Image (cartoon, rainbow, N blue to C red):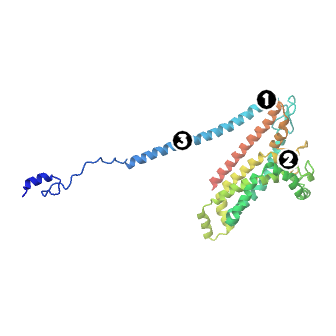
Amino acid sequence: MTDPTVAASLAGPGDPGDRRGGSASAVPATTAPAAEPAPSLLKAGRRTGAQQGDRIFRGFATGSGAFMVALIGAIGLFLLIQAVPSLLANKGNFLTGRTFEAGDPNNLNFGILELSFVTVEVSIFALVLAMPVGLGIALFLTQYAPRRVARPFAYLVDLLAAVPSIIFGLWGAFVLAPAILPIAEFLNEHLGWFFLFQEGNVPLARGANVFTAGIVLAVMILPIITAISREVFERTPRAQIEAALALGATKWEVVRTTVLPFGRAGYISASMLGLGRALGETIALMIILAATPAMFSGSLFDGGATFASMIALSFAELNNNLSAGAFIAAGLVLFVLTFVVNAAARLIIARSGAKA
């Protein structure tokens, strides 16, 4: 028989045969797994990366805005530098003169009053025509038309913005002018006592007047007013509309009490943007309007020239710096005029927001 003491020593402390409380088995030592980063450290790392991205984006956005401001300032400075020598050599009054004679550099006599009258009148006339039509289209597409009708109709209206200006000009001169001649004759015959509808400095049958040009401009700016107004009206809070309907309001009352107040500022912005487009239109007006030596009387049946159309018609023939500077001075006035329009639009929007 084997001695128990010898058996215990042969079995070792970890042997299962050890009946006296030894370890069940000997576990070899292994390398402990690496400790994972604490959640707070991970969050701090993510926050640092987000802050870095935010700083980069803020710098990019600030730089882009500063670049645009600098670019606009550089354009204005260029126009001013080029215009000053011609303004100093001008023998007429630049602001109140009604003739623009800049072909002879030794006899510059140019003023912008006539150009200002034509530019402002044709643009405002176009805006008066386009604003109610654009408002009606935007309300129809967002509040009345079924979705299957509204979407393709909206695409069709937006496509007007892609039509080249020269196409609008040709359409206005050869198609629209003969078609609206009866309307022009009716207005001139029955409302001729009012200065807007008096006999103009070009024959009515010719159609080369502010009346035709304004209607063409209205069609050209209609997509701008309609598209922006439609996007604004679609964002009217649904809760407000449903609350008005729950109170028993009709569809028109819903539009009048919720949609129009909510989208008023956007509608005004769209209209001012359209006005800026009308002020700078060139090719279409150059084709339609008849440049005439007769003074502009303010009638819609007058011919004339806007800043842009006059520059486009005459600038290619200039071959000296002083004559070119006279037209650049006119362009500078148009440049300033667009800023005045934008400033007025922002003022109107700010007041609308304050009242709302």
Three-letter code, disc 1: Pro
Residue 186: horizontal and vertical position, in percent? Answer: 90, 59
- Per the rendering, the mark at residue 287 is 2
Q: CA distance from mark 3 to mark 1?
A: 44 Å
- In which quadrant of the rendered view does residue 114 lie? top right
Three-letter code, disc 3: Ile
User: Could you tell which of marks 3 and 1 lies nearer the N-terminus?
Assistant: 3
Position of the N terminus by quadrant? bottom left
Which residue position holds label 3?
56
User: Could you tell which of marks 2 and 3 lies nearer the N-terminus?
Assistant: 3
245 and 2: which one is in front?
A: 2
Q: CA distance from mark 1 to mark 2?
A: 31 Å
Residue visible at 15% across and 57% down in the picture: 17
Which residue position holds label 1?
85
Position of the C terminus by quadrant? bottom right
The answer to whether residue 185 is above or below residue 306 is below
Residue 308: horizontal and vertical position, in percent? Answer: 80, 42
Q: How many marks?
A: 3
The answer to whether residue 273 is above or below residue 89 is below
154 and 189: which one is in front?
A: 154
